[in-house]
Amino acid sequence: MQTLHSMKGHHDNSFASARSPDGRTFATGNQDKTCRVWDVRNLSKAVHVLKGNLGAIRSIHFTSDGQFLAMAEHADFVQIFDARSDYTKRQELDFFGEISGFSFSPDMDALFVGMWDRTYGSLLQYGRLHNDN
């Protein structure tokens, strides 16, 4: 295998990556508690650095329209960023428990979060509210 390009910015091991539907943007999640958003046309530095709260970013997903990017830590937090606001608007979901994974529904109206717990393992569903202003 040949290295095509080396990217600098993260300070530890990476666990997750996701490609935006726009074809120009992708994100990486890392042990250093950051998610970095990259533009494939210039990989010299990340265009955005999104910070987690407690631990490594273990999972990242873009919605199918590319409007939102969500990232999950290994426990307790999922953050959803509005890509169209240049990642300045965000919503944080805060709960107690190990996160086993998450996914957007195909119509982007729901976010499903899997919780891993021997006693209370569950699948949480969050609905999307639409602002028609």
Image (tube, grey):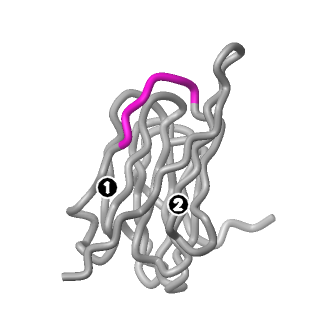
Q: x, y (%) of residue 8?
A: 43, 56
Mark 2: secondary structure: strand
Residue holding disc 1: 49
Please check the rendered image and state whether residue 29 is part of the magenta-colored stretch, yes or no.
no
Magenta highlight on residue 94: yes
Front position among marks 1 and 2: 2
| Disc 2: which residue | 110
Residue 66, compared with residue 27, is above or below; it is below
Three-letter code, disc 2: Ala
In the image, the segment drawn in magenta is 93-98
Residue at 33% from the left image edge and 72% from the top image edge: 130
The structure residue drawn at horizontal position 67% and vertical position 25%, both measured from the top left corner, is: 121
The reply to whether the C-beta atoms of the residues labelled 1 and 2 are less than 8 Å apart is no
Name the residue located 40 percent from the left edge and 38 percent from the top edge: 33
Q: CA distance from mark 1 to mark 2?
A: 25 Å
Inspect the image, locate mark 1, and give the three-letter code of the amino acid beneath it: Val
Question: Which quadrant does the C terminus fall into?
Answer: bottom left
Which of these two is toward me, 7 or 58? Answer: 58
Residue closest to the eye, 70 or 104: 104
Which disc, if any, is residue 63?
none
| Dominant secondary structure (helix, strand or loop) of the stretch shown in magenta | strand
Dot 1 or dot 2, earlier in sequence: 1
Instruction: Answer above or below: position of 51 versus 88.
Output: above
**Among the 4 quarters of the image, the one containing residue 101:** top right
Q: Which residue sits at x=61%, y=65%?
A: 105
Figure quadrant of the N terminus: bottom right
Q: Position of residue 100 (x, y in %)?
A: 65, 36
Disc 1 secondary structure class: strand
